[in-house]
Amino acid sequence: MKVELENGLLKANGKYFELKNIRGKEVFQEIEKSKVTEKEKLVRELAKKLKDNLDREVVMREALRRVPSKELKKIDKLLKSKKKNYKPKTREGHCADMLIGNYILPVVD
């Protein structure tokens, strides 16, 4: 059985599940695939409408403020390096983060 996290939901054997609290107990409840698809479509549509209002520099500054100074110096050294043996890239999953070399910078927790 393959279990993975997709669109913020648990996916196992092609079925989606979300964690619910039922009578004080945490249980995984199945969600119809059509509802997951519908929600993802709406999320993408809203993101497209809102992205022009996002100040990327402010978001990155806030993310970098959470990083310890020692790690900031490592990131600075990587970014100033003459060798381009890294490529910062945005990753999706249970949170959005950026991979810079071997360092993972959480952008959204």
Image: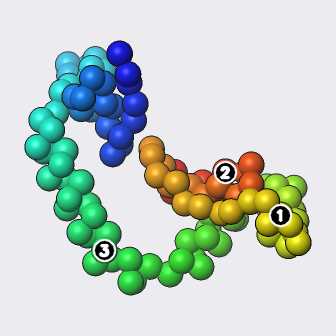
In this view, 8 is above or below 31: below
Numbered badge on residue 104: 2
Where disc 3 sits, the SS reads helix
Q: Residue at x 44, y 79 (%)?
A: 54
Q: Residue at x 73, y 51 (%)?
A: 103
- The type of residue carrying mark 2 is Ile
Judged by depth in the image, the label closer to the viewer, 2 or 1, is 1
Cα distance between the residues tagged 3 and 1: 31 Å
**Is 30 in front, or is 66?**
30
Where disc 2 sits, the SS reads strand
Q: Are marks 3 and 2 in contact (CB under 8 Å)?
A: no
Q: Tell me the residue that label 1 is attached to.
A: 78
66 to the left or right of 33: right
In this view, 79 is above or below 95: below
What percent of the width, then of the height, locates residue 60?
Answer: 61, 70
- The type of residue carrying mark 1 is Leu
Q: Tell me the residue that label 3 is attached to.
A: 48
Task: State which quadrant residue 69 falls in.
Answer: bottom right
Label 2 neighbourhood size at 10 Å, few (<14), some (14-19), many (20+)? some
- The type of residue carrying mark 3 is Lys
